Amino acid sequence: MLRSLKKVFLLIDAFTAEAPEWTLADLARHVDMPKPTVHHIMITLLEGGWVDRHPESKKFRLGVRLWEKGSLAIKQMGLRDLARPHVEALMRECGETVRLGILDTVDPAWVIYIDRVEGRQTVRADNAATVRAPSYCVATGKAMLAFQPDIVSRVFARPLRGYTENTLTKPADLDRDLALTRKRGYSLNRSEFHGEVVGMAAPIHDHEGRVVAAVGISAPAYRLGPEVIKRIAPVVLATAGEISRSAGFVTQGGTYEAFTKGTVRSVDLVRGVPAVRKCASATLSEPSDRSARGLRARGRQ
Amino acid sequence: MLRSLKKVFLLIDAFTAEAPEWTLADLARHVDMPKPTVHHIMITLLEGGWVDRHPESKKFRLGVRLWEKGSLAIKQMGLRDLARPHVEALMRECGETVRLGILDTVDPAWVIYIDRVEGRQTVRADNAATVRAPSYCVATGKAMLAFQPDIVSRVFARPLRGYTENTLTKPADLDRDLALTRKRGYSLNRSEFHGEVVGMAAPIHDHEGRVVAAVGISAPAYRLGPEVIKRIAPVVLATAGEISRSAGFVTQGGTYEAFTKGTVRSVDLVRGVPAVRKCASATLSEPSDRSARGLRARGRQ
DNA sequence: AATAGCATTCAACATTGTGGAATATCTGGA
DNA sequence: TCCAGATATTCCACAATGTTGAATGCTATT
């Protein structure tokens, strides 16, 4: 809409973990805009505190105000605080790193981690860590995509980049994987993003039945073999269920009706929108032995 | 500079901890702009993921991208990770809540807390907590102001709002307090922001001698009496010194010269800029008994 | 059925950002 | 010391851009 604003977005997006500092000229080259234009915008951002500038090197960095408002944004979401105890409990139960992720509202091909608890005891929301990952290659991302089929097409809009030899880059393959995820209730990442790293995750629903996030664990492949996965799956599913529940998501009567003005409605878990038909919650129940076996067989190929 | 951008700033600033959600009309009224103008801007922000919108209530919230880039900003500053172990150590030593704060680059009348460790064991960077406080009423803020006299005038630019009956609202009073702070090396907050809450803090210098942050503790007044303050002061000062040191700040030769191309320069701690004269580091040394006594006397009035 | 409050769309207008050219400042090399 | 080639910054005329009143379409409330 507003073109000048989009230019600002482009400029801010130039600042990444890999390139956190920019000189004016480099920045102008990078975004392909005239230097004076970039200068004007950056000076304005500087005045507002949105970027910072080293007084000598003249290099720009992202500023304090961004952090301040960002903190507010995450606080607003509330989900993080809500989920925290369950996330920690999950870590304690399985000992591995636990992540809480949401889909990037702009581009669902990316997942953004809003919390993380390290395998050992480093219990801190370390936002210095990786915040962004391709949703179609990680467990949390796939857990969310699987239960929001209408969003998947947006992921397919662009070609799926392969990160490892295991990455599912063909839409058909990914679709099959998502279907499987829907069946068993949890998703699996078999080293599709980083080699040697595997993970599993389950979706979290809000009080209206929408998929809003996912919790998952990740670990070195050798430590998370098929048998372990089978054993841990119920725990991950239970965690996702508990978080959903504290977010107000209840499948039969009770809390749920409070949010729909006396009308008790159930939710179509697959579409993620309130629907008429009543359905059993795959999230809250444990997976059948059948699907667990199916998983193990698939993991071998 | 760019007026349209400033409008955007105004809009984003409307979102606070107290008013985290806005409808379009309310927002337009609040910032006193025509509705279509606000609409255009917000839609653009929405597309960029900088704000979010509840699909039904149509209310705007701050979005994920803000959080993402904010995380990057704080990570970039690095100071937080650097200081973390010392911050934690300080908490362990005195058992009280420890905060790490920096001055708002735009308006030094405010301090922004970039880290916090709770008195007990809740060791997490809880950015859901208070992030912003008036610098002239809190220990961390006054520690930074005291050692940057040129900045203080900017704080005086606007009248100092009183938060409690102890708040130093008269410039002369504050100046006296800052002078005292310079002498003893650490600042004190005697319930000047929140009643019943007192605190003390010391400034942190970077490798060029600039004051970049402050560490401090805060506690209920009854728990942090004059005698306790006297006992704890050296610990706080030592912590600030250690953080400064790991940031590359060294007062005699050594690391410091590495940053000034072979020229060994010392730093004028008060002005915060490299200077010719050599001075003893108030930050790294313990306060004399005299100043500690002076403090106790003052605390009585 | 009617009102009042929302969000949204449109298009004509002039305010606003744009960017080429000029200047100032810095850095490293000869 | 001086120059060459970077950099950041300032200026101003132009037109592209954001602006906003008026009109429309919603959704709730009375």
Image (tube, coloured by chain):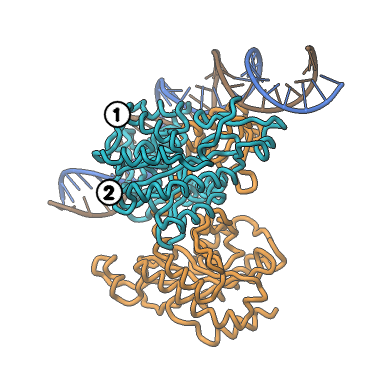
Chain colours: A orange, B cyan, C blue, D brown
| Front one among B159 and B83 | B83
Distance between the Cα atoms at labels 1 and 2?
21 Å
- Determine the residue located farthest toward the bottom in the rendered image: A289
Residue at position x 59%, y 63% in the image: A136
The x and y percentages for residue B152 are 41, 29
Pointer 1 chain = B
Image quadrant of residue B179?
top left
Determine whether, in the image, residue A71 is placed left or right of residue A301: left
Q: Which residue is drawn at 56% across and 68% down?
A: A120
The circle drawn on residue B170 is 1
Tell which circle, 1 or 2, labels the residue nearer the N-terminal end: 1
Give the residue at mark 2: B196
Q: What residue type is labelled 2?
A: Glu
Image: B225 above or below A204? above
Task: Determine whether the residue tagged by mark 1 lies in a helix, strand or loop.
Answer: loop
Where B114 sits versus B176, above or below? below
Pick the residue in front: A98 or A276: A98
Q: Which residue is drawn at 30% across and 50% down?
A: B221
Q: Is mark 2 on a helix, strand or loop?
A: loop
In screen coordinates, is D19 left or right of A181?
left
Above or below for B30 versus C23: below
